[in-house]
Amino acid sequence: MINRIISTLLFLILPLFVSAENHRDINVRHISVEQGLSHYTVNSIYQDEFGFIWIGTMDGLNRYDGHRIKTFKPSYSDTSAIRENNIRAICGDGKGHLFIKGLNSLSEFDMKTGKFTMLKEDNVRHIYFDGERLWVAGGGYLTDLQQGDRQV
């Protein structure tokens, strides 16, 4: 039942993420755990400038290319890997960088190198990219992380 609801929601929501200038012929009927999605609970969906659909679930970050799903999960022996499984929000800067909010942390993914960098390890509640700055809100603070200024 839950898989059917998620499949229906994805079918209805995905067309909203395809813009006219980045139009690619991707026909998606449903994406589920059976197709490789890391978890049936989807917290966030984002389409990057290359047309990939990024799906944040309770058990990993997933990238869908229209055919296959690649899942990113923590590897504690690899410092360039993502650090959290529970992905709550995803946004990007349109220049090859994704910002991924875990349950409490914030990471950056460089699509060119395929590496993650931890930007803030705790108390991250909300993120938003306004086209120029990444805004980060937490317990009692609101700050922007400008390109090149990654210190919080």
Image: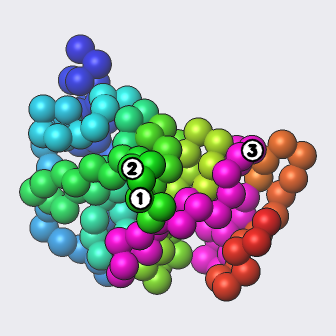
Asked whether the viewer can see residue 72, the reply is: yes
Q: Residues within 10 Å of mark 3 (few under 14, many from 20)?
A: some
Residue kind at label 3, given as amino acid type: Asn
| Circle 2 residue | 75
Task: Determine the CA span between mark 3 and mark 1.
Answer: 23 Å
**Mark 2 or mark 3, which is nearer the start of the sequence?**
2
Residue kind at label 1, given as amino acid type: Asp
What residue is shown at x 65% (from left), y 42% (from top)?
104
Q: Position of residue 144 (x, y in %)?
A: 76, 69
Query: Which numbered disc covers residue 123?
Result: 3
Residue kind at label 2, given as amino acid type: Ser
Q: Is residue 62 left or right of residue 24?
A: right
Q: Looking at the image, is 4 positioned above or below residue 134? A: above
| Circle 1 residue | 78
Q: Main secondary structure of the magenta part?
A: strand
What residue is shown at x 83% (from left), y 57% (from top)?
142
Is 84 in front, or is 31? Answer: 84
Q: Looking at the image, is 13 positioned above or below residue 113? A: above
Q: What's the magenta region?
A: 107-136
Give the SS element for disc 2: loop
Give the SS element for disc 1: loop
Q: In which quadrant is the N terminus drawn?
A: top left
Please tell me in which quadrant of the rendered image residue 60 appears.
top left
**CB atoms of marks 2 and 1 within 8 Å:** yes
- For residue 85: magenta? no
Q: Position of residue 25 (x, y in %)?
A: 13, 67
**Mark 1 or mark 3, which is nearer the start of the sequence?**
1
